[in-house]
Image (tube, rainbow, N blue to C red):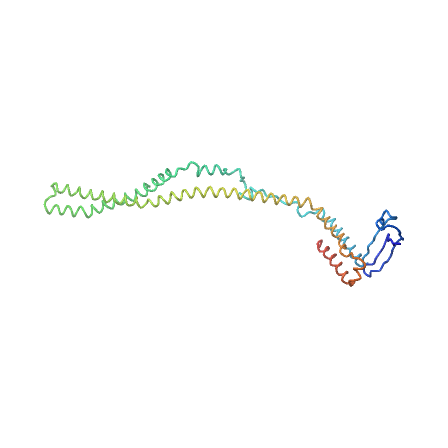
Amino acid sequence: MTKIYSKIVIDMASGKTLEEQSFDYSGSIALCGSSGGGDTKTEIRYAGYIEDKHKDFLNTVAAQRKSDIDNSPFADYEEIPVDVAFFGTGYLISSFPSLYDMYGKFMAGLDIDTLYSQIFEDTVNAPEINNLVAAEAVMMDDDIDMNVLPRFQVGMRDINSVMSSSYVCGRAAIEDARVKALSRFSAELKYRMIPVVTDRWRTHLDWNRHTVMLYAEIMRTYYQVKTNVEEHFYNLKELDAKWPWTVLGQERAGLGALQGAKTSDSEYRKKMGWQETVGTIAAVVGMAAMFL
């Protein structure tokens, strides 16, 4: 004979059986079940004060659910257009030339030899260089008129050769020296400008390259930011759509807050009653903290 319980009520605080319904069964244990006869129902009870606290907790959760379920924190956010935030008001990505167009302006078809010739001409024969040569010529003429010619004329007068061919040759020699000195000054000045030409040429090439690279980096950053912002907005929309299930999920967790307090009679007797009670209260308090 086997005693089959169809209902049993156990006080979880004391471990005592408060109510039971059973019948005697004789036969194969394998057939013992709902088909063996009668409905089987098991009811687990907890200490009265724990059940009361859990009931109050569930009422609090239900009230909070009613106020929160239609008050999603992820709704009514303002989407800031990426173009406005990135470029400023009034500008769009279409307001800027394409990367291919930017490359075409600064790099495509660039002849470095022609560029060097242009920079050389602009630097060596610049108006400033010509003005320096002209200023040097004026200073030479002043020095000749104020110092060289007076001494030359006095010397020629002393030897009574003012009207001779020697005087003419002397003046020609002075003018030749002037022309050579001025040419030497101009050549040296322009020679010293060649490193400047090279630096300007290299700087121009680097500037073109850096301009294209910087433009490409700006475009890459723009599309990366655009992707991140749109993903953020999609996540907010998803969280807003899932908000009712999130609230209901918290309520479902509250309903199962006492599941951790279940234990068998033999396990219960191995523990002190206060240990089981503290564990159950901790579970309920932990769930309550999620809604406060």
Left or right placement of residue 200 versus residue 213 in this view:
left
Residue 87 is situated, as x and y percent measured from the top left of the image, at 53, 43
Residue 49 is situated, as x and y percent measured from the top left of the image, at 80, 59
The quarter of the rendered structure image containing the C terminus is: bottom right
Give the residue at the far left of this rendering. 160
Determine the image quadrant of residue 285: bottom right
Identify whether 185 is placed above or below 109: below
Give the residue at the far front of this rendering. 28
The quarter of the rendered structure image containing the N terminus is: bottom right
Identify whether 274 is placed above or below 207: below
Query: Count the marks: how many?
Result: 0
Closest to the observer, 203 or 282: 282
Residue 239 is situated, as x and y percent measured from the top left of the image, at 66, 46
Closest to the observer, 246 or 86: 246
Determine the image quadrant of residue 272: bottom right
Left or right placement of residue 287 versus residue 177 in this view:
right
Residue 32 is situated, as x and y percent measured from the top left of the image, at 85, 50
